[in-house]
Amino acid sequence: MAFPIRIARTVPANVHLLLPIPKDAWKSFAKHAAGSLDAQEKTALARTNASLSREPDTALLPLWTGRRWLVLALLEPIASLTTRTARDAGEMLTERLRAVGIDQVFLVRGPVTRKCWQALQEGMALGSYAFTECKGTLPEEGAGPSKHTPVTFTFRQAQDLVPPVRLRIIADAVALTKDIVNRPPNSATPAALEKASRELAQRFPSMNMKVLQGKQLEAHGLRGISAVGRGSAEEPRLILIDYAPVKGKPLLLVGKGVAFDTGGLSLKRSENMVSMKQDLTGAATVLGVLQGAAEMNVRRRIVGVIPAVENMIGARAYRPDDVIRMVNGVTVEVTNTDAEGRIILGDALAYASEQYRPERIIDLATLTGGCAVAVGEDIAAILGNDPRFVGALRRAADDAGEPLWELPLHKPYRKFLRSKVADIVNLAEPLSASTIQGGLFLQHFVPEKTPWCHIDIASVAFDDEKNRATGRMVRTLLHYLESRNRA
Ligand SMILES: [Zn+2]
């Protein structure tokens, strides 16, 4: 990841000043920044004062003073500035600096709280991410070659910095997740997920990896994963990564890895199929979190569990009306092949619970389109069987500025899932409370007494407007693991 940082007492030559200013705090900012500005710059800054309040939040205002640019980065008024808005502003700021070709700035600290100042830096580190793997030889119109050059940030003193190691670990973990999701489906296949997992596991001596593939899945009774993956030319897999810096019952981290989702024979309409490369975000999140946890040296055993398939059509594809006997004996009548995520997750949850006897389980999945209907595109949904566990994850999400809202595992809704020919159907009609139904389905595959949370990230995983992954929930889970590490 590229988030170059330097420390310098004085402003180096040819480096522009970046001044993040809450728009109502100009006076105290001018005092704070006095040591970094010359007389001419102070006057120039004073002159713009009156117009600042009329500018929109997070505007970038360049100010030429004859020697160097002062880049005023407006932040929200101080009273409403939160770590969330400061982080978002930091991210946007870095992207804009890069877009206009500024690659060197000296950061002048303003009168913001330490927490907001750190969040701003975290945002800047996150904003340094760019996905360029797929760019070819054509130059981008209207942009110089510097568009993807990282911005180097210079700080006056080390105390002004979030520990850079932590910043880098977090930004790298989020970047790993984003890279896997952003890759096109012709290069992010189940085999590519296995390769990314192997590369990760090989970097850390405390990680071990196992893969069950093709016929081995059937031999282990994993007929759900096998059925969903059968229509693809690439064999389905169950990837298991055991991070064990200490002994003990692990936390299971299970992520849906549908490398591409056509819907299967219950085919999606073409406009709904675009962006379905994001259906492996749960798996990508697991890999990002495992990397972050290992780099932070989290002293806790974690097993990453990734069912990796492609949901395709073809002569061998599974059908509506099929009945699948899952690994724990529960039978599922397939009513819609597009509700494939819960089938592969059901097998993965039941199998890994049996194999590892986990202390706790978290699963992450782009599971239901209904999630965005229920909570909108800035919030992920969490459902769980243990209120304290749900509470701990929600606190971590608040810390990380990644909103998480609890939906109930409402027992009376189990009736929707009843099947006339098997135990349960994979998708019920009518499709009301579909996110809750998804959670209730998965609950059939989780040991009753093991604390378990299901996080539906279908609402937040992908920014459709910008056509890119968000990396949401990686930081939340790292915050959660860090807080448990201290306890
Ligand atoms: Zn689907």
Image (cartoon, rainbow, N blue to C red):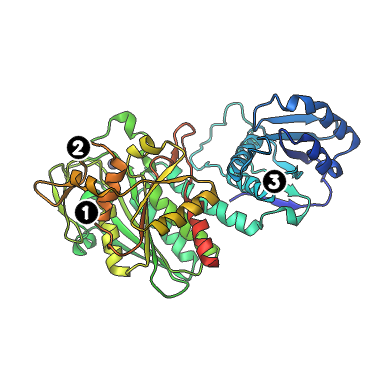
- Marks 3 and 1, Cα distance to the nearest angstrom? 48 Å
Task: Establish if 371 lies above or below 228.
Answer: above
Residue farthest toward the right in the current orientation of the protein: 39
The image quadrant of residue 242 is bottom left
Question: What residue type is disc 3 on?
Answer: Thr
Which mark sits nearer the N-terminus, 3 or 2? 3
Circle 2 residue: 429
The image quadrant of residue 264 is top left
Residue 275 visible in the snapshot: no
**Residue 271 rendering spot, x and y as whole percentages:** 33, 29
Which-is-in-front pick, marks 3 and 2? 2
Instruction: Give the residue at x 21% y 42%.
Output: 427
The local crowd at label 2, few if under 14, some if 14 to 19, many if 20 or more residues have their Cα within 10 Å, is: few
Mark 2 near ligand 1 (CB under 8 Å)? no
User: Is 144 placed left or right of 232 in the picture?
Assistant: right
Residue 174 image label: none
Question: Closest to the observer: 127 or 234?
Answer: 127
Circle 3 residue: 152
Instruction: Give the residue at x 54% y 63%.
Output: 295
Task: Establish if 52 lies above or below 364.
Answer: above
The local crowd at label 1, few if under 14, some if 14 to 19, many if 20 or more residues have their Cα within 10 Å, is: many
**Residue 248 rendering spot, x and y as whole percentages:** 40, 74
Give the quarter the ligand 1 occupies: top left
Question: Closest to the observer: 88 or 308?
Answer: 88
Circle 1 residue: 224
The image quadrant of residue 124 is top right
Which mark sits nearer the N-terminus, 3 or 1? 3
Q: Which element type, helix, strand or loop, lies under badge 2? A: loop
Question: What residue type is disc 2 on?
Answer: Glu
**Residue 52 rendering spot, x and y as whole percentages:** 73, 27
Which-is-in-front pick, marks 3 and 1? 1
Which mark sits nearer the N-terminus, 1 or 2? 1
